[in-house]
Image (cartoon, rainbow, N blue to C red):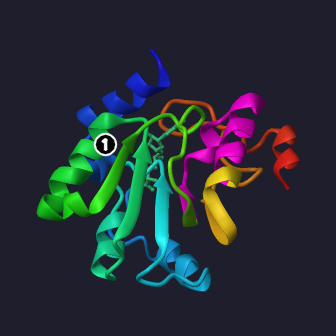
Amino acid sequence: MSNTDHWNEVYIKKAEAELSWRQDNPSVALDLMKMAALTVRSSVIDIGEGTSRLMDRLLDLGLSDLSALDMSESALAAARVRLGVRENSVKWIVADITRWEPTQTYDIWHDCAVFHFLVKPDDRDAYIQRLSRSVIPGGHAIIAAFALDGPEKCSGPSVACSRPNIHALA
Ligand SMILES: C[S@@+](CC[C@H](N)C(=O)[O-])C[C@H]1O[C@@H](n2cnc3c(N)ncnc32)[C@H](O)[C@@H]1O
């Protein structure tokens, strides 16, 4: 099964309450964004948005240049339904982050629990290349990943954070 099929199946088969990473309020992400000089004019992309509440909260704050990327079309479809008419205020991007070609730049790049799934060095390089190309000079990237001594798996796929070559990112 491909990673895309895996994630689509997760979001089709599991109720939102069953997702171990689910947060009612992504308060840590919002606090970090405020530390990164978030304003209503900031352009923000969430990598691996899933069905997170991040876009909801950023819309509540009045932001209007918002993008949500995920390889799972099912996840983004569920997030769009939840947002109702407000879904039109977000750019929805169904793509694998390692193959996506950015078409705009961002002030803030946010990733909660995606980077650690990139177990191949080439995929991590592709991610960093896209991040470097699309975050403006002086912009910010907020990446939350498992710690080096963290779990080796999450929701099926292996994660890479406990492997030594992750240090190449530093
Ligand atoms: C653990 S979930 C976290 C979802 C969301 N960030 C949150 O905090 O609720 C990981 C998400 O990353 C997405 N994902 C995994 N690998 C990806 C890739 N290579 N490109 C884009 N999305 C990916 C999955 O579809 C899934 O929605």
Which amino acid, by three-letter code, is at mark 1? Ala
Query: Measured along the vertical axis of the image, is residue 49 above or below residue 41?
Result: above
The single residue placed furthest to the left in the displayed view is 85
Categorize mark 1 by other alpha carbons within 10 Å: few (<14), some (14-19), many (20+). Answer: many
Q: Is residue 146 visible?
A: no
Callout count:
1
The single residue placed furthest to the top in the displayed view is 1
**Residue found 61% across the figure and 38% down from its top:** 117
Which element is circle 1 on?
helix
**Residue found 39% across the figure and 67% down from its top:** 65
Q: Is mark 1 within 8 Å of ligand 1?
A: yes
Residue 127 highlighted magenta (yes or no): yes
Quarter holding the C terminus is bottom right
- Residue 113 image point, x, y percent: 55, 51
- Residue 13 image point, x, y percent: 25, 32
Q: What is the chief secondary structure element of the magenta stretch? A: helix
Foreground of the two, 40 or 159: 40
**Residue found 29% across the figure and 68% down from its top:** 56
Q: Is residue 46 visible?
A: yes
Residue 140 highlighted magenta (yes or no): no
**Residue found 77% across the figure and 43% down from its top:** 162
The single residue placed furthest to the front in the displayed view is 103
Q: Which residues are magenta?
A: 109-131
Query: Measured along the vertical axis of the image, is residue 130 above or below residue 37?
Result: above
Q: On the image, numbered disc 1 is attached to which residue? A: 75
Quarter residue 91 falls in: bottom left
